[in-house]
Amino acid sequence: GNAQVYGNARVENDHMHCGFDCFGSFNRHTHAYKTKGNKVEITCGCFRGSLEEFEKKVEETHKGTIYEKQYKAIINLIKIKFGIDG
């Protein structure tokens, strides 16, 4: 396909990435993937950063809205998928 990954992405198989379509105020695609350093990185619209940075950005941008709830659910699923506690 024509998939594009950035930075230190290391996507060797389906267990190393996941995506969510049509969420948030602009119906964006949110993609999570493992990096070469075995961290999880997120891309969503023009955002690219760590899972922690994404969670902070969601709280800053969408606090108290349905979009915060949607993104928090996505964050929880990403944590489950990649075995992250918290």
Image (cartoon, rainbow, N blue to C red):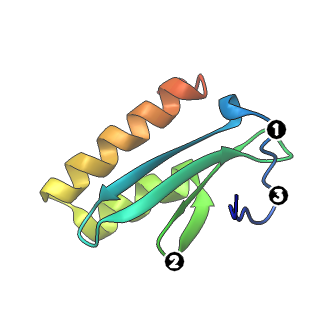
Of mark 1 and mark 2, the one earlier in the sequence is 1
Q: Label 1: few (<14), some or many (≥20) within 10 Å?
A: few
Q: Residue 37 at what x, y percent from top left?
A: 85, 44
State the residue lying farthest toward the bottom: 46
Q: Label 3: few (<14), some or many (≥20) within 10 Å?
A: some
Element at label 3: loop
Describe residue 83's horizontal placement relative to residue 21 as left or right: right
Q: Which residue is at a point 71% across and 65% down the rendered structure image?
A: 4
Q: Are marks 3 and 2 in contact (CB under 8 Å)?
A: no
Q: Are marks 1 and 2 in contact (CB under 8 Å)?
A: no
The residue singled out by tag 1 in the image is 12
Q: Which residue is at a point 29% across and 66% down the rendered structure image?
A: 27
Q: Nearer the viewer, mark 1 or mark 2?
A: 1
Number of numbered discs? 3
Q: Residue 39 at what x, y percent from top left?
A: 73, 42
Q: Which quadrant holds the N terminus?
A: bottom right
The numbered mark at residue 61 is: none
Work out whether 30 lies above or below 4.
above
Q: Label 2: few (<14), some or many (≥20) within 10 Å?
A: few
Element at label 2: loop
Describe residue 11's horizontal placement relative to residue 25 as left or right: right
Work out whether 33 lies above or below 30.
above
Q: Amino acid at mark 2?
A: Cys
The residue singled out by tag 2 in the image is 46
The numbered mark at residue 8 is: 3
In three-dimensional space, the C-alpha distance between marks 3 and 2, rounded to whole angstroms, equals: 17 Å
Of mark 3 and mark 2, the one earlier in the sequence is 3
